Image (cartoon, helix red, strand yellow):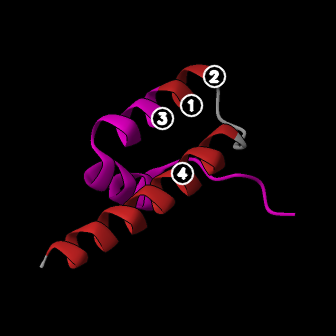
């Protein structure tokens, strides 16, 4: 059972890093970026889900 929890934690870490990179690269104001990054850092799973639904996106290339 420990392996499943560790794997889930690793996946969540990768997704949170991806979300933070996307937030920093977005066109949102600095204040909004800081709030979104704090949300993702303080509440990793819930913050990621909220960001996925409503957060700022980095511009498409």
Pick whichever, 12 or 24, lies toward us: 12
Local SS, label 4:
helix
Local SS, label 3:
helix
Please state the horizontal and vertical placement of residue 24, each as a whole percent of the image: 66, 38
Q: Looking at the image, do the residues carrying marks 1 and 3 touch, with CB atoms under 8 Å apart?
A: yes
Please state the horizontal and vertical placement of residue 39, each as a whole percent of the image: 36, 36
Q: CA distance from mark 4 to mark 2?
A: 18 Å
Q: Is residue 53 left or right of residue 30?
A: left
Q: Which residue does the numbered mark 3 point to in the structure image?
A: 37
Q: State the residue lying farthest toward the right.
A: 61
Res. 33 mark = 1
Q: Looking at the image, do the residues carrying marks 1 and 2 touch, with CB atoms under 8 Å apart?
A: yes
Label 4 vs 3, first from the N-terminus:
4
Q: Looking at the image, do the residues carrying marks 1 and 4 touch, with CB atoms under 8 Å apart?
A: no
Please state the horizontal and vertical placement of residue 54, each as a whole percent of the image: 44, 53
Q: CA distance from mark 3 to mark 2?
A: 11 Å
Q: Which residue does the numbered mark 4 point to in the structure image?
A: 17
Label 1 Cα neighbours within 10 Å, binned few <14 / some 14-19 / many ≥20: many
Pick whichever, 6 or 53, lies toward us: 6
Q: Which residue does the numbered mark 2 point to in the structure image?
A: 30
Label 1 vs 4, first from the N-terminus:
4
Locate the N terminus by quadrant. Answer: bottom left
Q: CA distance from mark 1 to mark 2?
A: 5 Å
Local SS, label 2:
helix
The residue located at (30%, 35%) in the rendering is: 42
């Amino acid at each position: 059972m420990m392996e499943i929890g560790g794997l889930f934690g690793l996946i969540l870490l990768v997704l949170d890093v991806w979300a933070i990179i996307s937030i920093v690269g977005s066109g949102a104001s600095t204040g909004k970026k800081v709030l979104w990054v704090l949300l993702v850092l303080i509440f990793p799973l819930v913050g990621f889900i909220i960001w996925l639904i409503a957060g700022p996106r980095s511009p498409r290339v």
